[in-house]
Amino acid sequence: MGILVTYILMHPLLYSLLAQGATSAPLIREGVRTKPIKNNAGDAEPALKQALVERLDKVAETKPRQMGIQGYSPTSLKEVRENPQMMGIHARHYDAGGTYDSDQVYYNKNASPEILAHELGHVVSGNTKVGSVVRKLRDNPKLAMALAAASGIIPLGAAALTPGDDDYDEAMLGTLALASPTLIDEGLASKNALAMMDTAGMRADLGQRGRLASGLLSYAAAPIMTASLATALGNQFDENVPAQ
């Protein structure tokens, strides 16, 4: 146990992943369901697809060039482990020139319907002016590298170079700023999900809203927790500025 703790403390990226996993647990539970619940996502698909069309007509500047929805009904955790897309994912594809080409939504039919609604929400936001820009930033490989750096290098450097113990804000803002395309993209998807569920006559209850919120929180938790750890480590190396 002591070795594990030491390893986590010395590797902020792993620490961040653990923090993210803890907050996303409610969504993960839905994604790995092997038995359909009452009023499940599979049953809700027709109504949500119609709600998607209406939402696109209402708020989108463009329409999906091509789109596919693939639902799964896993009967074992082994199936889900071997096919992670069964848990629910939105894939946005680009052609060789980097132009938006198509959307593909995968989801677990056994899960609660907000899982599917959230992935469809990505389709809507990706076809708005702001959402499309945010998604391009999120899918940008260079930005992905910057996000990886934010999992340790940037906040640790900020904490080490800022004298004293009051550098948490600088570290947290650094990681959140780099993670913001992901946070905004996920937030827009959930906003559209709730609107589509209303249109489909399945207004989200508190549990469903809570799961969507926990999913968004999971993306914020990693940079926040990383900033906390990196600040603590960085403060071991800085020197207090002498009083003038």
Image (spheres, helix red, strand yellow):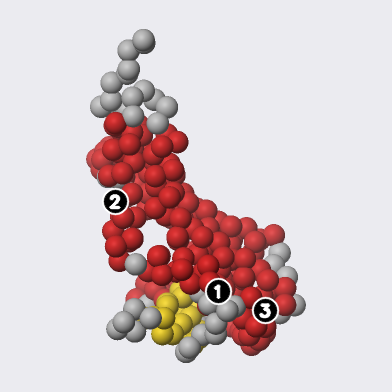
Q: Quadrant of residue 136?
A: bottom left
Please report whichever mark, 3 or 2, sits nearer to the chain's N-terminal start: 3
Badge 2 marks a residue whose secondary structure is helix
- Residue 22 lies left or right of residue 94; in this view the side is right
User: Mark 1: which amino acid?
Assistant: Thr
Between the residue at mark 1 and the residue at mark 2, the CA separation in whole angstroms equals 29 Å
User: Mark 3: which amino acid?
Assistant: Lys
Residue located beneath label 2 in the image: 149
Quadrant in the picture for the N terminus: top left
Residue 113, can we see it?
no
Badge 3 marks a residue whose secondary structure is helix
Residue 138, can we see it?
yes
User: Mark 2: which amino acid?
Assistant: Ala
Point out residue 148 in the picture as x, y percentages from the top left corner: 30, 55
Residue 240 badge: none
- Residue 243 lies left or right of residue 117; in this view the side is left
Q: Going by the picture, which residue comes out furthest to the right?
A: 201
The residue sitting at 34% across, 67% down in the picture is: 140
Q: Nearer the viewer, residue 108 or 48?
A: 48
Between the residue at mark 3 and the residue at mark 2, the CA separation in whole angstroms equals 38 Å
Between the residue at mark 1 and the residue at mark 3, the CA separation in whole angstroms equals 11 Å
Point out residue 146 in the picture as x, y percentages from the top left corner: 31, 55
Classify 94 as above or below 143: below
Residue located beneath label 1 in the image: 128
Badge 1 marks a residue whose secondary structure is loop
Residue located beneath label 3 in the image: 58
Please report whichever mark, 1 or 3, sits nearer to the chain's N-terminal start: 3
